[in-house]
Every structure is written in C-alpha cells, then in structure tokens.
Image (tube, rainbow, N blue to C red):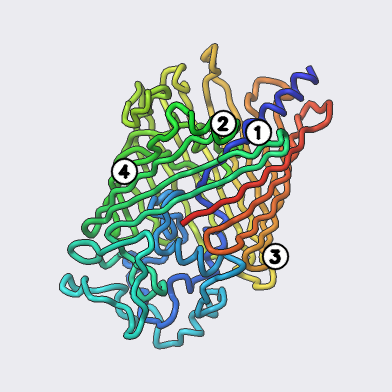
Amino acid sequence: MKQWLTLLAWVIALTTLIPEADATPLYMARSGRTCDNCHSLPNTWFDPPEVWRRKCTLSCASCHVDPNGGGLRNVGGRYYGRSTLPMYWAVERPLDDRTFEELREFLGPDNEPTSAPASGPAQPADRQMDPRPPGSPEPNAGPNWGRPLLGSSEMSWLDGRYGDLNADPLFQAGGDFRLGFWSAGPLIFPMQADFHAAAHPVEHLTLATTVGVRGDAEGFTATAEGDPPIEMRDVWLMTHEWPALSYARVGRFLPAFGHRVEDHTAYTRRPFGLSQEDPGNRVLGAEIGFTGNYPYASAMAFVPVERNNGGNPFDAAEGYGGALNVGYRHMGWSLGASAMLRNRPLDNGGDTLDGSVQWSFNPWYYWKDLPLTWLGEVAVGRLQRPFSGRKTTQIATYQTLSWTAKRGLALQLRYDFWEPDREVIDDAIHRPGVAAEWIIIPGVTLRVDLRVGIPEAGGGEPPADLFAQLHYWF
C-alpha cells in the first residue's frame, strides 16, 4: 500500500509539468495600494460622484481584456507590468505606491469625487478628442494600432493616464512564452507559446482570440510534432464599457470559478477541470457580469466541448452547465464565492457540482512597512468516478503568503492540499513549498518553485521537485 501511495505522489508531481499563463490574483490583491496606476499625473481623470460611472476596479478586467483574467493585457495591464512590477527599466510613476488616503491628500481637496467632473468625454462629439495634455508623447505603435471607428466611449480607458501607451486601440496583439525546467528528468521543455489578438472596431464591442502551441514535456521536437501542434484556445465576442464596468459575451472560453491562479496544476484548478492545458476544459457559452468596485458578480450558461474533436474548437458536446461568481473586493481585502454545475456523459468528464470560497488580505495596504499578501481558497466538489460513475466528493485548498522583498522580487510560502475521494481512506496529499519570483525587466519573469508532495498515509521519501520557468510577455 505504501508503495502505491508513493507512486501516486510521484504521478501527481509528474502532472505538474506544463503550466501555462493564467491570471495572477496576487497582483489583484496588491493593487489596492497602487491607485496611481490610473490616477497618475497630470491629474485630469477624476472619479465622478456616481459610483456606477467610475472606472476603478480591482478585478482581472483592470489588466486583461478577458474580464476573468489571463491572456491579452489591456493598457492598464501593460502599464502596471512596466511601471510597478519590474526591478529594472521600470517606467517611473508619479506617485510611489501610495495608499488611498495618501493619494487623496496628494491630489488636494479640489479633486474630491463629490466636486469632480465626470470621468471621460461627456458628449459623443468629444469622443474623438485626444484627452492627453499638450506636449505628451504620441502613443507608441507597439502591438496596438488605431482607434475605434466612432471614437471611445465614456467608460473606456483614456490616453494621458499611461504615458505613451495607446489606451483604447482599434487592434491589439500580445503573446506569452514560457520555457520550463524540471529537476526530475532533468527536463528542459517548451511550456507555452500563446498569441493573443483583439479587435475593437466600435465602442462597446470587442472580438478577441488566443491561439497557442501545445507544450510537450518530451521537448521541442515532440511539441512541434503534436497533433495538432497549434490549437485555438479562446474566441469570443464581448459588449463592454457599460456603467459599473458591466459586460456580456458569447464564445469559447474557460469557465469562471474561484481564484484563477497562475499555476494551473493547483489542486483547486486541475482536479476541478479548470486547467489551461486541456482543450476539453473550455466551454461554449454566454456570460454576463460587472466588475466595478467594490462588489462584483458574473453568471454564465454553457455547453461542453468534445475532448477529442479533431481540432474543431466549436464542436459542442452533449450536456449543459452554468457558473456563478459573487464577491466584494476592497482595497486591502477580498471575499468571494463560486458555484459551477456541469452535466455531461461520463466519457466526457461526467457530472460535477462544485463550490468555492476565496479570499485575500493585503496588510501592505494598511501598513506600508509590511509588504505581505495572503491569498487563499477552499473548493469542494461532487463528481463521478471515471469507471463506475458513482458519485463522490473531493476537497482542495490553496494558500499563498507572498512577501515583496523589493520591487520586482517576491518570496512566497505556499501550501496545497487535495483529498481526491472522501470515501477512500488516507488518499489525501499535502504539498508545501517555497518560491521566488523575480520580475527582472518589463515583460520578463524568472520563477523558481521548490515543492514537496507528502501523502497523508506516510511511508517512503516524500517526492520533492524543483521547477523553474522563464516567462516573457508583450
């Protein structure tokens, strides 16, 4: 029995080979103390008195085109990635990560929201005007071009807030590339090569897609010979830039559930059918939601896709499902809950009913000399066993405590737990770990994780592995 438990632990460690880019809720939790990511000088962008007209948000939509995070970054994400995160070559910010109270004091009483003008152009005739101050540099071309054909909406991001970046482009592109090293081989292999694109032809409408190379732990040759080597991951059409940062979209995407952490092998992600690397985890559906501070909510209905679809990303499978997310994100903390139902044939994943509670706490917002951020989640799910179809329950937790040692360098303690079947004795596994994340220059990150998988039944040497990844994005 002990040999089988040790083998199970190694199998679980082996499945951590090919993580892909995802959103980083730690950045979301920390950003409550970087109001100057948007409220930067010269101060011509004010919050209007009506909360539903404000653009402030601590959601994934503040940095990503996808309201649920991951993939293509919008102007806020690109600016945050080059001004706040990197250790070297960072664009200087007008304020130095001030708290909200310090920011208000810095801006002065004349800029209080109750007496401030509306945020953004107020009249349709003004929407094609350049709101940047005289003498500002022209927006750089980069991977972003043009303007929406009829001008920007009142709720779109504005030029002049992000240096020389184009805040509301007609077309934008981006990419995520990762190279991995795993100590067990040792192996050096391609983890990710994703290309993102979005078109914003007119206000309130965006079409976005992501295509990518399927990584293979066997190396570069095996990746190139994959079947298929390139696949469409996401494609959706969204109407957005509405009051309270509300939106609606239809297409193919990953369901929104829990913390969309960067490590898709986390036990709150992969065992719940939410990891990026499996095309069968995508769905075809419709989603509505809003992400304005402080409460947020989203709801979606979907049908699953065929796992063996021969490369057709729109091959709908039998079944149906839905997901619901609600919560509250404050400047220094957040609390949320998720629920997801999937009704599918057993050979396509089976029926599941999952629930999750997520939270974050950022004492750094309250005490500037305590640069800690705590992120956590507990997920519980009902699922069918793959052969018998009998229903059982799984439980997983995810915990990360991150210390920002200095700009660009974060040291982390992490603990994962997974009990895959509540009816099986001593099948749970604990996985503590430590990590260092070094954001060297804008767009380049080196991350090293040391993890130990400890079966609850004990026995044998717990498998430990060192995993490193080099990530470049633009």
Q: Which mark is residue 271?
A: 2
The residues tagged by marks 4 and 1 sit, at their Cα atoms, a distance apart of: 33 Å
Label 3 with label 2: CB-CB less than 8 Å: no
Question: Mark 1 is on which residue type?
Answer: Trp
Q: Nearer the viewer, mark 3 or mark 2?
A: 3
Residue drawn at the location 31% of the way across and 39% of the way down: 251
* First in residue order: circle 1 vs circle 3: 3
* First in residue order: circle 4 vs circle 1: 4
Q: Which mark is residue 399?
A: none
Residue drawn at the location 68% of the way across and 49% of the way down: 448
Percent coordinates x, y for residue 458 in the rendering? 81, 28
* First in residue order: circle 2 vs circle 4: 4
The residue under label 4 is 236
Which sits in the foreground, 145 or 66?
Answer: 145
The residue under label 3 is 405
Label 3 with label 4: CB-CB less than 8 Å: no
Q: Nearer the viewer, mark 2 or mark 4?
A: 4
